[in-house]
Image: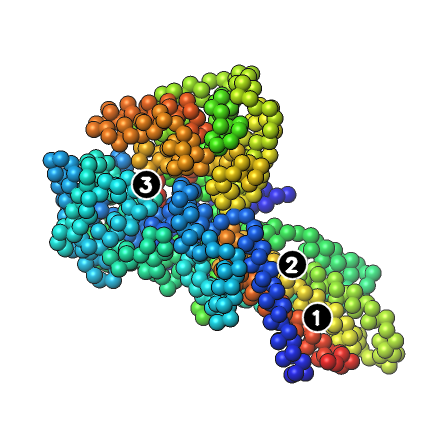
């Protein structure tokens, strides 16, 4: 009997018991209705949203630090800390004015100099910021509430860069903190967001506490993702890290926690049966599964070998391995961009559609010159999504007649080894698995994995002039139609050259007690507007 | 005795130094890179390299080791790569839950296992003996997480008597502290109780066959007096030994138990640190565990002299 079987049995049995009328709170439960207890997706091991870019850090940081602009549910940047902005006629000078009355958690006012220091630190680490730095002429504070960003050439996506939700977000910190080297951690967690971080109660790996910031002045608009009025309805939010999904499920069922960010697929049916628990899709932008082939070494340095794999792979196999039998949780993805978003395209996606053609794939693989050499496939076993995909890939490659060197290890090792540019037999690799948050795959701006600029590209180091040309076209586009056209061409070029292999689009659930209301769907858990009744 | 204890303490220092060097070397040659974990999945290789440099991970092995030893000699366990908090503070945060769990488990074991072992020896070959030993085999065979889930299901979800997860410090009250530890202690204690009960039975059986026991019986001494005054004291050496060695089992078992019951103890800290390659934290914990083992061994040796006057140093 394995552990998962045991926990499924336990959770299932407990659900039946609870739905049978045994749903009174546990004797141990004594938390106030003004405290929201939340189980995050992962451990909050550090708390510098610029230094470390894990999603869990970004999610916590969004409570503590505010941004100048915030992306809303329509994927549009909206003013947040900013009251107004002006662009010069030549598009090179941006002048921003802050809202009055903004305060940091230490009581100090938010000044333009704080913004300048914060943006400088952010830009050194963020892909869009790194595009601005080479064209930056100056970034200066004009007065306490006004700052100016002067560029050498227009950057039409400026507001998107300042509003975007993918890490690192351009969080605003006090100048003394923001002056920290972007590659070193900050030690003070003072922001101007709607909640304060209770550092004294932080037990890294176990618990993080956030308290309502009484002096926060929300905007008057309705909250929408990272934009609008961020009204905090509880006094405290406690993040309780639970490494064991069965424990999290049990704690949610007996009311020891209020909200579990992402229950694993196995336990969702159990939670759905519980009359005290609501379960719904957490993030409609979902995730895009992927595996990357190393473009530097045989066999995948030949586009025919990469295309052969694409011709044979079944996205359904990958998706069912990740989400199980729930058809509502996945869809095929003949492209790279997030379904349902404005730039989504299937141009050039025929290779991923229809019946899988193993004979043609084997023929193409043979034409590439593959002659049975080992294909080193790295798989992080401690991440269920990568493990599931790795198993499917191993089977796929074997069916294609490839000699698979399946290296199942932990994420720390995969993450380290994938950076090696040495040949697979000398510590390098041929393929590894990952996935990308759908929210990061809406535009080329935040989509690190789609870049194909050789040595500067993400692991696998693809080179595709066609893809890179269309990335540039998107940045220069002046209308949505131009953007769509550029991304369509980009999608085709990236598929033709197989920048990476998309394994499908999948969604995950979130679950909460029914005495909690106001939970919004989105790419991160939004705590504003969430209330709890006794 | 005092000079013996002092000599033993001094002798622990080279042992701990060797352990430290071994662990440091092992981590250094093991695959995996904390910078990769810090940088996140979407980071560029350049970002990872910059983080490596800022953490000093690009420096030669001997420089890193020398720097670490120098800090240790000054009482500084270093700073966590991830949290930027002092390792000693992180260990301090986690020590309470783990010590609490181990203490309750140890007490539970002694209170349950030793009497069971004595009774089993007393009734050797009987149904009672077979039942007790059957339970011991059962307890020894079940993985900690299975027992943990079963207990959580019955006592937390079904009966709603106890919480399923978490830890409350003793400063918040005795019962809030204890209620969080009962289920994990039982889960963790099962294997331990089984082990100690079996050893106690075996040791008692051997002692009960000795001439002086026969003499005691012949003199008309009661069964309780024979078992608990004469026999148990003379069987105590192997029992104390196995209880001491069992501390190692407790530490290993605590890793799983703390995960199942979401207790923020040292076990979870260890696993988190290993998965993230948080070298300073791993090194600090290993040093601590080495010290605990040495201390436990020392205590066992001291207890030997108390229970068996023939043992002298």
Q: CA distance from mark 1 to mark 2?
A: 18 Å
Q: Which residue is mark 3?
A: A127
Q: Mark 3 belongs to which subunit?
A: A
State which quadrant residue A379 falls in.
Answer: top right
- Callouts 1 and 2 on one subunit: yes
* Chain of the residue that carries numbered disc 2 in the rendered image: B
Q: Secondary structure at mark 2?
A: helix
What residue is drawn where x is 50% and y is 60%? B63
How far apart in space, not on screen, are marks 1 and 3 (Cα)? 61 Å
* Picture layout, residue A188 above or below residue A509: below
Q: Secondary structure at mark 1?
A: helix
Inspect this view and state whether residue A315 appears. Answer: yes
Which residue is more in the foreground, A16 or B202?
A: B202
Which residue is nearer to you in this view: A396 or A27?
A396
The C terminus of chain B lies in which quarter of the figure?
A: bottom right
Residue extending farthest to the bottom is B2
Q: Which residue is mark 1?
A: B240
Instruction: From the viewer's perspective, tell me whether residue A396 is left or right of residue B215.
Output: left
Chain of the residue displaying label 1: B
A387 versus A216 height, above or below: above
Disc 2: which residue: B190
Question: Taking A197 as reference, is A374 above or below it?
Answer: above
């Amino acid at each position: 009997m394995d552990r998962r079987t045991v926990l499924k049995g336990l959770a299932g049995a407990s659900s039946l018991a609870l739905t049978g009328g045994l749903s009174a709170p546990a004797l141990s439960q004594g938390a106030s209705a003004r405290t929201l207890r939340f189980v995050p997706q992962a451990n909050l091991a550090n708390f510098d949203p610029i230094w470390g870019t894990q999603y869990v850090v970004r999610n916590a940081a969004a409570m503590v630090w505010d941004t100048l602009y915030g992306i809303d549910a329509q994927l549009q940047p909206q003013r947040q800390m900013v009251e107004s902005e002006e662009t010069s006629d030549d598009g090179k000078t941006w002048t921003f004015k802050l809202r009055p009355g903004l305060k940091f958690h230490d009581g100090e006012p938010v000044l333009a100099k704080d913004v300048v220091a914060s943006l400088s630190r952010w830009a050194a680490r963020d892909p869009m910021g790194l595009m601005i730095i080479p064209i930056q002429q100056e970034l200066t504070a004009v007065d306490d509430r006004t700052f100016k960003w002067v560029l050498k050439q227009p950057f039409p996506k400026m507001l998107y860069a300042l509003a975007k939700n993918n890490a690192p977000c351009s969080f605003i910190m006090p100048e003394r903190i923001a002056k920290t080297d972007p590659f070193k951690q900050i030690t003070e967690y003072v922001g101007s967001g709607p909640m304060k971080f209770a550092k004294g109660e932080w037990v890294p790996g176990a618990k993080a506490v956030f308290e309502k910031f009484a002096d926060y002045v929300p905007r008057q608009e309705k909250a929408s993702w990272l934009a609008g009025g961020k009204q905090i309805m509880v006094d405290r939010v406690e993040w309780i890290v639970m490494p064991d999904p069965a424990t999290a499920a049990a704690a949610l069922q007996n009311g020891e926690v209020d909200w579990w960010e992402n229950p694993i697929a196995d336990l969702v049916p159990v939670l759905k049966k519980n009359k005290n628990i609501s379960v719904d899709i957490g993030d409609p932008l979902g995730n895009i599964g992927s595996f990357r082939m190393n473009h530097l070494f045989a066999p995948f340095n030949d586009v025919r070998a990469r295309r052969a794999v694409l011709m044979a792979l079944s996205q359904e196999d990958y998706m069912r391995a990740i989400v199980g039998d729930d058809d509502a949780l996945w869809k095929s993805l003949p492209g790279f961009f997030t379904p349902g978003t404005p730039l989504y395209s299937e141009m050039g996606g025929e290779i991923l559609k229809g019946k899988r053609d193993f004979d043609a794939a084997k023929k193409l693989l043979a034409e590439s010159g593959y002659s049975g050499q080992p294909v080193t496939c790295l798989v992080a076993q401690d991440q269920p999504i990568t493990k599931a995909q790795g198993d499917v890939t191993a089977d796929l490659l074997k069916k294609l007649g490839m000699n698979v060197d399946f290296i199942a290890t932990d994420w720390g090792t995969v993450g380290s080894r994938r950076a090696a540019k040495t040949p697979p037999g000398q510590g390098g690799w041929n393929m590894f698995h990952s996935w990308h948050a759908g929210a990061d795959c809406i535009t080329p701006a935040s989509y690190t994995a789609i870049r194909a600029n050789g040595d500067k590209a993400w692991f696998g180091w693809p080179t595709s002039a066609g893809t890179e040309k269309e990335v540039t076209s998107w940045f220069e586009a002046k209308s949505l139609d131009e953007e769509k056209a550029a991304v369509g061409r980009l999608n085709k070029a990236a598929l033709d050259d197989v920048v990476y292999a998309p394994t499908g689009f999948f969604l995950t659930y979130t679950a909460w007690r029914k005495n909690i209301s106001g939970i919004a769907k989105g790419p991160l858990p939004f705590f504003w507007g969430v209330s709890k009744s006794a | 005795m005092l000079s013996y204890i002092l000599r033993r303490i001094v002798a622990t220092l080279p042992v701990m130094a060797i352990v430290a060097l071994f662990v440091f070397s092992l981590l250094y040659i093991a695959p995996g890179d904390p910078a990769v974990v810090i940088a996140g999945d979407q980071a560029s290789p350049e970002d990872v390299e910059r983080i490596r440099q800022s953490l000093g991970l690009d420096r030669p092995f001997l420089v890193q080791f020398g720097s670490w030893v120098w800090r240790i000699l000054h009482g500084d366990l270093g700073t966590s790569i991830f949290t930027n908090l002092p390792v000693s503070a992180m260990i301090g945060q986690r020590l309470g839950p783990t010590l609490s769990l181990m203490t309750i488990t140890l007490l539970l074991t002694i209170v349950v296992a030793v009497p069971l072992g004595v009774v089993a020896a007393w009734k050797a070959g009987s149904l009672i003996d077979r039942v007790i030993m059957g339970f011991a085999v059962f307890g020894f065979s079940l993985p900690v997480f299975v027992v943990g889930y079963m207990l959580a299901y019955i006592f937390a979800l079904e009966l709603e008597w106890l919480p399923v997860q978490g830890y409350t410090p003793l400063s918040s009250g005795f019962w809030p502290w204890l209620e969080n530890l009962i289920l994990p202690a039982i889960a963790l204690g099962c294997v331990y109780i089984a082990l100690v009960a079996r050893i106690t039975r075996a040791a008692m059986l051997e002692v009960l066959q000795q001439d002086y026991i026969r003499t005691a019986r012949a003199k008309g001494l009661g069964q309780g007096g024979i078992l608990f005054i004469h026999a148990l004291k003379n069987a105590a050496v192997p029992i104390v030994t196995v209880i001491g060695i069992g501390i190692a089992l407790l530490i290993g078992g605590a890793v799983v138990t703390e995960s199942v019951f979401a207790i923020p103890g040292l076990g979870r800290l260890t696993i988190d640190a290993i998965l993230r390659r948080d070298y300073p934290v791993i090194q600090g914990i290993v040093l601590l565990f080495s010290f605990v083992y040495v201390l436990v061994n020392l205590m066992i040796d001291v207890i030997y002299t108390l229970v068996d006057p023939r043992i002298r140093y």
